[in-house]
Image: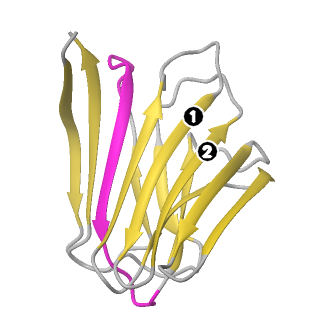
Amino acid sequence: MPITYEPIATNTLGSATATVTFSSISGSYTDLVVVIDGTTASTFTQLQMRINGDTGTTYSTTYLWGTGSAAVSDRDSNISGAMNPGFLGTGQGNNTFHIQNYSNTTTYKTVLARSSVPGNRVAATVNLWRSTAAITEIRFNLISAENFASGSTFTLYGIKSA
């Protein structure tokens, strides 16, 4: 069964921006993929992802990351306000988020993420949003209260099984 990535929306920042939001997301796909290619002013900062405006303690993250000289694994449960699925820095960082069964209204939502910040770290995370609501909005910001740099690109894809 072939799988098709269909571009839904792309936002290339014309100026430094604190928050990027995809809203009014259609429920007509099986999964979503978000790709972020961007930079920040600091060497390393963590991304936050909020779903449907939920600011409760409904998020959990399990992560592995390495720097080339150290490796870390950990888990954060009952995170308040947003999950922490990725990283950015001064080098052109890349983050890919695969949001599974996002429109299903009977299961919690899983987000698998891969992240790399050149010269700093690579990471893989498994994130959980403990809600059965269909995802209609995804918001990204940086945990350090910094801005995403001008030129950073955010692309949302829908995945359809044919």
Q: Which residue is mark 1?
A: 110
- Whether the magenta-drawn stretch holds residue 161 is answered as no
Amino acid at circle 2: Asn
Mark 2: few, some, or many residues within 10 Å (few <14, many ≥20)?
many
Where in the figure is residue 129, as x and y percent of width and height?
65, 38
Farthest-out residue, front: 69
* Residue 65: image tag: none
Dots 2, 1 in contact, CB < 8 A: yes
Span shown in magenta:
25-43
In which quadrant of the rendered image does the N terminus lie?
A: top left
Q: Is residue 29 highlighted in magenta?
A: yes
Q: Nearer the viewer, residue 79 or 11?
A: 79
Which percent across, then down, holds residue 98? 41, 39
Badge count? 2
- For the point 24% across and 69% down, which residue is it? 13
Q: Nearer the viewer, residue 91 or 9?
A: 91
The part of the image, by quadrant, that contains residue 46 is bottom right
Q: Amino acid at mark 1?
A: Thr
Which residue is found at the position 33% from the left and 16% from the top? 28
Residue count near mark 1 (Cα–Cα under 10 Å), binned few <14, some 14–19, many ≥20 = some
Q: Residue at x 48, y 52 (%)?
A: 139
In the rendered view of the protein, which quadrant contains the C terminus? top left
**Whether residue 5 can be seen here:** yes
Counting residues from the start of the chain, the first of labels 2 and 1 encountered is 1
Residue 127 shows which numbered tag? 2
Q: Secondary structure at mark 1?
A: strand
